Image (cartoon, helix red, strand yellow):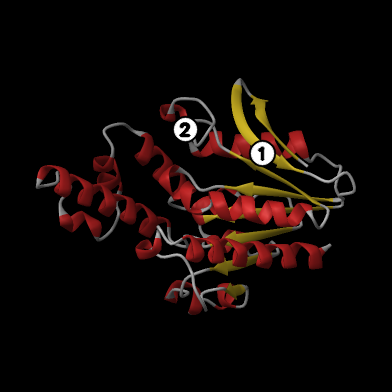
Amino acid sequence: MVTHGFLPAQNKALYFTRYFSEESKTGVLFLYPIWNDRSRFVSSFHTAAKALVYSNVDSIIFDYFAQGNSPGSESALSYQSIKDDINSAKNAFFGNHYQSFFVIVGGLAWAFCHDLECTKIMLVDPEISIAKYFNALIREQRTKEIVAFGKSKISSDILIDANENAVHELCEFELAIRVYKALKDRTIAELDQKDYSLIVTSKPGRDILTNPSLSKRLIDLSQGTVRTAKSEQDPEREDTRHNKIAEALRNLIVSGN
């Protein structure tokens, strides 16, 4: 079964989709990354949740405050507000009702999970480096400005370090710099005390392959057809990526019960 609605959480309305089975003893919480990176995971997460419910596994997919379908002003978005939203969703839907509780995170969302209690964490196409992630945001913004205006207020030399000044130039408001400051000291090594896996759908980077802690947890789905920037309009490629992620997640969770 599937339901949709808004979860009241600390005077905020968080939009959710719940896939559930009356016989389930296992719960799964899906966590999107923030900003435009969310769109990479919408179809994959829902495909996985649909596959899991047929194995009697309950799932919740929700949007943080001011993200996706959850209303609100982005000016109020912060590291702590996202952690509060995660805990609100977890407590509202799962509590102590399940024997096993898994968390599936996309992109950079692992940075919000270092103190989250769960049976296991699955990182899907994770952004390992905080600095590289913000560097990519800066580069994307710079390209948009050049295409639109023929030049950019963001100089090319600041792309080297993704420093705080660069992030500040990315936005007229303080949102990006505030989130970056909160995240910049987070490292994926904080998850080493937890049971977690890395699932990647493109060729693993050196930051994964050369790190023994990460490489031993790697599940490489990059072989075969996967979604790329050049195949955005190719439904077969897109569907293949989603199904591969869904099957990998289902196998990990069902075998972990």
Please tell me how crowded label 1 is: few (under 14), some (14-19), or many (20+) other residues with Cα within 10 Å.
some
Query: Residue 130: percent from the left, percent from the top?
Result: 42, 56
* Nearest to viewer (mark 1 / mark 2): 1
Query: Residue 67: percent from the left, percent from the top?
Result: 49, 35
Which of the two residues, 223 or 203, is positioned nearer the viewer here?
223
Which of the two residues, 35 or 78, is positioned nearer the viewer here?
35
Question: Which residue type carries mark 2?
Answer: Leu
- In the displayed structure image, the side of residue 18 where residue 24 appears, left or right: right
Asked where in the image residue 9 lies, by quadrant, the reply is top right
Outermost right residue: 23
Outermost left residue: 150
- In the displayed structure image, the side of residue 147 where residue 208 appears, left or right: right
Q: Image height check: is 143 above or below 169?
A: below
Reading the chain from its start, which is encountered first: label 1 or label 2? 1
The answer to whether residue 246 is seen in the rendering is yes
Asked where in the image residue 173 lies, by quadrant, the reply is top left
Distance from disc 1 to disc 2, alpha carbons, whole Å, reads 21 Å
Residue 77's disc is 2
Q: Which quadrant does the N terminus fall into?
A: top right
Residue at 49% over, 73% down: 225
Asked where in the image residue 119 lies, by quadrant, the reply is bottom right
Question: Which residue type carries mark 1?
Answer: Thr
Query: Residue 241: percent from the left, percent from the top?
Result: 54, 65
Outermost top residue: 11
Q: Secondary structure at mark 1?
A: strand
Q: Image height check: is 209 above or below 234?
A: below
Q: Which quadrant does the C terminus fall into?
A: bottom right
The answer to whether residue 186 is seen in the rendering is no
Query: Residue 131: percent from the left, percent from the top?
Result: 37, 57
Q: Which residue is mark 1?
A: 17
Q: Secondary structure at mark 2?
A: loop
